[in-house]
């Protein structure tokens, strides 16, 4: 293009500069304009803002990742639930996600119900009386303060062990493995425990005081009168001699 004079050349250059500036401005606007995506603090993917959840601490997460994290922790009983980004930088953070806030995240109903139950169970214990069949919540502190639980429902006087849940009698000693109760029953019925080490409980219905334990592999012979072990042997001659010697000295 031919320019007639210097003023035309200057004018043409000015118009070119204006066109270039406008074009450059449009390019910069596309590159540096307001972003419509964000980086999720859990999956670390760039996500659209229309699925973003921003916590009070300012951290942002995609709804799928945050709901998945919350659901997993609730199912595992890991409450309270901290902000994932806050806990990553500070394991002792107290920036917790509240249940009320989480209810706005479109959590599954079963997750919400489990979370609510877990919060209640932090202060109360659900119990069922096996005698009257009634159920309810009692204060956790009261529950843990006693080894034996009395039924709190109506006129029921049932009482049971908190640890093994077996029935107990008020004022009587209780052992969860039943050793005390068994010893008491044996004493009341005159039963004896084999002293040969097998632990068999023996009840004599008739006959002499010489008892032969019938537990497999025991071979013990003992005195039902005094409870002493006489001999452990399968040799009848040894057994006969040991029995004879014992009853010469048994003073019971």
Image: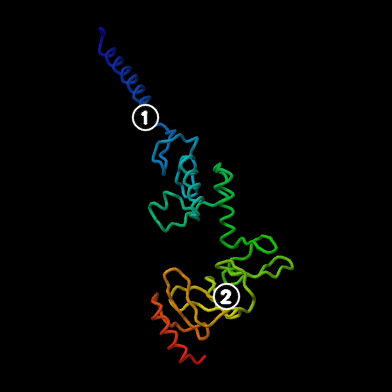
Q: What mark, if any, has residue 31 been given in the picture?
A: 1
Q: Observer-nearest residue: 74 or 135?
A: 135
Q: Point out the residue furthest to the right here.
A: 155
- Residue 242: x and y in percent read 41, 84
Q: What mark, if any, has residue 40 been given in the picture?
A: none
Question: Within 10 Å of the Cα at label 2, are there few (<14), some (14-19), or many (20+) other Cα atoms?
Answer: some
- Does the CB distance between marks 1 and 2 fall below 8 Å? no
Instruction: Identify the mark nearer the N-term, 1 or 2.
Output: 1
Which residue matches tag 2?
A: 181
- Residue 74: x and y in percent read 51, 51
- Image point (50%, 54%), residue name: 77
- Image point (38%, 24%), residue name: 26
Q: Is residue 251 above or below residue 63?
A: below
- Image point (74%, 68%), residue name: 155
- Residue 86: x and y in percent read 42, 52
Marks 1 and 2, Cα distance to the nearest angstrom?
A: 82 Å
Q: Is residue 154 above or below residue 12?
A: below
Question: Within 10 Å of the Cα at label 1, are there few (<14), some (14-19), or many (20+) other Cα atoms?
Answer: few
């Amino acid at each position: 293009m031919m320019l007639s004079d210097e003023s035309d050349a200057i004018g043409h250059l000015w118009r070119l500069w204006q066109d270039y500036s406008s074009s450059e401005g449009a390019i910069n606007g596309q590159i540096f304009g307001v972003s419509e995506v964000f980086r999720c603090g859990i999956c670390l993917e760039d996500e659209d803002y229309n699925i973003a959840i921003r916590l009070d601490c300012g951290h942002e997460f995609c709804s799928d990742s945050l709901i998945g994290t919350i659901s997993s922790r609730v199912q595992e009983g890991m409450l309270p639930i901290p902000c994932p980004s806050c806990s990553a930088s500070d394991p002792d953070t107290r920036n917790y996600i509240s249940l009320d806030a989480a209810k706005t995240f479109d959590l599954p109903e079963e997750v919400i119900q489990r979370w609510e139950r877990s919060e209640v169970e932090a202060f109360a214990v659900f119990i069922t009386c096996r005698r009257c069949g009634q159920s309810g919540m009692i204060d956790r502190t009261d529950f843990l303060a006693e080894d034996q639980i009395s039924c709190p429902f109506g006129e029921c006087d049932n009482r049971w062990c908190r640890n093994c849940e077996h029935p107990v009698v008020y004022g009587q000693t209780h052992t969860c493995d039943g050793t005390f109760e068994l010893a008491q029953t044996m004493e009341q019925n005159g039963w004896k425990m084999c002293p040969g080490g097998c632990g068999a409980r023996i009840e004599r219905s008739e006959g002499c005081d010489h008892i032969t334990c019938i537990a497999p592999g025991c071979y013990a012979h003992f005195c039902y009168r005094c409870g002493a072990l006489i001999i452990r042997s399968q040799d009848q001659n040894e057994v006969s001699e040991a029995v004879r010697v014992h009853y010469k000295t048994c003073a019971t």
